[in-house]
Image (cartoon, grey):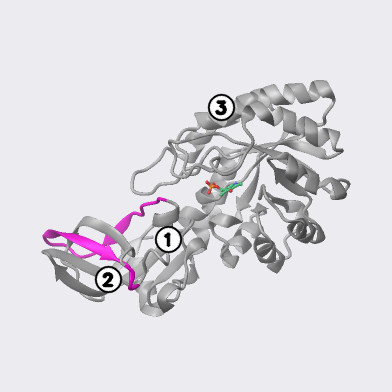
Amino acid sequence: MDFSTVQDLVRVHGTPTLFLSESKVREGYRALKNALPGVDLYYAVKSNATPDLVSILNSEEAFFDICTNGEIDVINKYSIAPERCIHTHPIKRDSDIRYSLEYGISIFVCDNEDELLKFVPYKDKCSILIRMSIQNPGCLVNLSHKFGVAPEKAWNLISKAHSLGLDVLGISFHAGSQNENSLKYIEALEYCRDIYRKAVLRGINIRVIDIGGGFPINYISPVIPIEQFCSPIMEYLERYFSSYRIIAEPGRVLSGPTMTLATKVMGRSLRNDVWWYYLDDGLYGSFSGKMYDHADYPMVVERGGPRYNSVLAGPTCDSIDVVYENISLPHLEIGDLLVFNSMGSYTCASASNFNGFPKAKIVVVD
Ligand SMILES: *Cc1c(COP(=O)(O)O)cnc(C)c1O
């Protein structure tokens, strides 16, 4: 969103505010659909559970990837059909499984034997995806550190699930979030080919492959266009998996570009020759993604003139609440507006009310 548009909106809505662009949600969803033709896109609600965002994606006929009872409640608010949802948390309590089944969601993810055993009482009502780990130290967030069975052990787990009488739908994996290397998907798919071949020989009726999320977006440095990024993945899928249903769990690529943050300078102080600017949003709020998601967001400041070594700090009384240090900025005035783009993923999702500062308001525009 450009600066003057945000300026006009701020006159009405104040700061801190996250502006959710409805047209960007629709454009982003359609662009990914186009880049992954025939692939069913399950939006990873974890990345941003804002009800308006879920509702817009629902009107685009998206599918949904949920992990918790709280996320089921968001889905329920819009009466989204359970057949359009999968439950992807690899570790669940019995009560979580029952909550999900009561809503009608019947596809679950497991990555170990203990978890498989939890499904034996419900085996006639559900199908299982086996989550495989794919190590990717090169991306922003490695989602295989905590979950996933090693590729060499995935076949044993599938075979175990089958012998327990569970319906194994197929394999899921997450190639790492903000993953700029599409060969990581191919690496995972190579393992899947081997495993699926064994399954066919054993007469296990595998029907699905779930390529997860991870698709990258533009932050400070641009990434390759999504169609180009996806084309080697599509080529591989068409060559080797044409008879399977292909699904994906995109989070960031759908939610990330859709929100723009407007925040203002509340106060300033010259400390040891460095200008400190205190913003009305910080690490405990919309910038929580700096902490947990390791993301850096593109910033727009309107003011010109000479630049000085500066610090942008959040509003709370905690010293850790510093958004940018050693940043070169023009001399800002109290009340100046700062605009940050690509603020839709893992931002408001992990924000808190720490120290009594309310989270940024969310306003739908376009
Ligand atoms: C977080 C998560 C996603 C979304 O990942 P992105 O990198 O945001 O696309 C998808 N699937 C699972 C299981 C996740 O935990």
In this figure, what is the number of numbered marks?
A: 3
**Is there CB contact under 8 Å for labels 2 and 3?**
no
Residue marked by disc 1: 288
- Left or right position of 271 against 363: left
**Is there CB contact under 8 Å for labels 1 and 3?**
no
Is the CB of mark 1 within 8 Å of ligand 1? no
Whole-number angstrom distance, CA of label 1 to CA of label 2: 16 Å
- Left or right position of 238 against 156: left
Residue marked by disc 3: 187
For the record, the magenta segment spans: 294-318
Is the CB of mark 2 within 8 Å of ligand 1? no
Amino acid type indicated by mark 3: Glu
Mark 1 and mark 3 lie on one chain; the one further toward the N terminus is 3
Residue that appears at 73% across and 45% down: 115
User: In the rendered view of the protein, which quadrant contains the N terminus?
Assistant: bottom left
Determine whether 269 is above or below 291 in the image. below
Residue 147, picture quadrant: top right
Sort mark 2 into few (<14), some (14-19) or many (20+) by Cα contacts within 10 Å.
Answer: many
| Front-lying residue, 219 or 70 | 70
- Left or right position of 177 against 263: right
Mark 1 and mark 2 lie on one chain; the one further toward the N terminus is 2
